[in-house]
């Protein structure tokens, strides 16, 4: 008697099916991996480790626009779009894109987003300054709001459609608002870490303490970002404004106002200030971070 065995079916890996089954893991893998790969030339150039005899073009006094920004766009925002399209289809893309245009929010949240962050940084800087505080220069004040708009369409647009628009709603559903924010903060910090080998992170003069303080800052500030995102009805523009207002203040105002709080000390001050505010937010909301209000219409959201 002859037995005929059926041929084995080869196991095939289907990327689209993997993305549909594991959208969050796919997003973090693509966002971090894509940016890291794109940043390799920047890290190896004269703007980083100096392995390659090449320097990226300078724009507005820094090579970050040409060396860092392309990788930033390739990471969170591009990965969020791809994973959303594959996992959720056109309807998911419309919902993801809709939060990007959710501007109709109580005006007081614009004050929180634009002024709250710099006010907290002023308090933290003052605490670390030893009383050496100076008035910002006229040039810094004139440049402040144009630079804020520039940050909005560079840093804010490159990052927040991924971290807050795509990842945060999913992480809150599975882990809850507080744990989801803490885990997201870890991934957010991890994404930045290779940049500490470039001028972005103060290479080569920065100590190893600076990335540690930065990790702590990302985790604690992620809690604050979640609270603002939830309380504004998942408004991505408000999350972007909150994010870039800190970046902009650090870039334009900080060194002139606090000349003795620079480098590692500045990062420690920001981590400390963010930590204090995040603890207050967690205590005031009992760890909910406004999560129950995320489903209300944006125009009805109250402070």
Image (tube, helix red, strand yellow):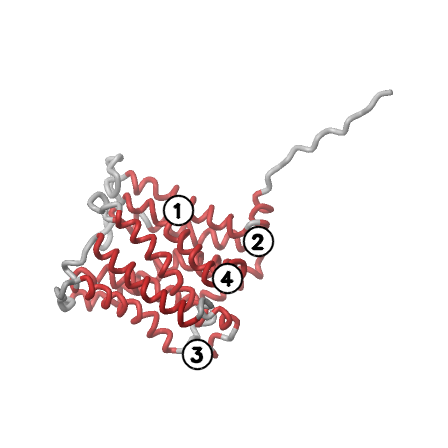
Q: Earlier in the sequence, mark 2 or mark 3?
A: 2
Q: Nearer the viewer, mark 2 or mark 4?
A: 4
Reply above or below: 100 against 36.
Answer: below
- Cα distance in 3D space between marks 1 and 2: 21 Å
User: Residue at point 80% right, 25% down?
Assistant: 4
Q: Which residue is mark 2?
A: 87
Question: What is the secondary structure assignment of the residue under circle 4?
Answer: loop
Q: Which residue is mark 4?
A: 176
Residue neighbourhood size for the residue with mark 3, other residues' Cα within 10 Å, grouped as few (<14), some (14–19), many (≥20): some
Question: What is the secondary structure assignment of the residue under circle 1?
Answer: helix
- Cα distance in 3D space between marks 4 and 3: 22 Å
Q: Nearer the viewer, residue 197 or 260?
A: 260
Q: Nearer the viewer, residue 32 or 61?
A: 32
User: Residue at point 23% right, 45% down?
Assistant: 203
- Cα distance in 3D space between marks 4 and 1: 27 Å
Q: Nearer the viewer, mark 4 or mark 1?
A: 4
Q: Which residue is mark 3?
A: 302
Tell me if label 2 and label 4 are in contact, CB under 8 Å: no
Q: Which disc is residue 35 wearing?
A: 1
Is residue 174 visible from the viewing direction of this image? yes
């Amino acid at each position: 008697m002859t037995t005929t065995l059926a041929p084995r079916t080869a196991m095939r890996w289907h990327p689209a099916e993997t993305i549909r089954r594991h959208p969050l893991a796919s997003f973090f893998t693509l966002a971090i991996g894509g940016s890291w790969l794109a940043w390799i030339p920047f890290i190896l150039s004269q703007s980083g480790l100096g392995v390659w005899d090449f320097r990226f073009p300078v724009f507005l006094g820094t090579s970050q626009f040409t060396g860092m920004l392309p990788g930033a766009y390739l990471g969170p925002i591009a990965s969020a779009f791809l994973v959303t399209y594959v996992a959720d289809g056109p309807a998911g893309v419309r919902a993801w894109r809709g939060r990007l245009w959710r501007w109709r929010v109580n005006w007081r949240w614009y004050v929180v987003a634009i002024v709250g962050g710099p006010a907290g940084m002023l308090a933290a800087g003052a605490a670390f300054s030893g009383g050496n505080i100076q008035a910002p220069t006229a040039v810094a004040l004139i440049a402040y709001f144009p630079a804020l708009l520039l940050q909005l369409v560079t840093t804010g647009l490159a990052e927040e459609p991924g971290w807050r628009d795509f990842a945060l709603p999913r992480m809150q559903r599975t882990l809850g608002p507080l744990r989801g924010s803490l885990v997201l903060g870890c991934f957010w910090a991890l994404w930045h870490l290779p940049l500490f080998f470039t001028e972005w992170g103060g290479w080569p003069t920065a100590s190893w303490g600076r990335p540690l303080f930065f990790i702590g800052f990302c985790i604690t500030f992620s809690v604050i970002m979640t609270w603002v995102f939830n309380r504004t009805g998942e408004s991505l523009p408000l999350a972007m404004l909150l994010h870039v207002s800190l970046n902009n203040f650090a870039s334009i105002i900080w060194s002139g106002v606090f000349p003795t709080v620079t480098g590692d000390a500045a990062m420690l001050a920001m981590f400390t200030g963010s930590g204090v505010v995040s603890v207050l937010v967690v205590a005031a909301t009992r760890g909910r971070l406004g999560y129950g209000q995320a489903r209300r219409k944006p125009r009805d959201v109250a402070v």
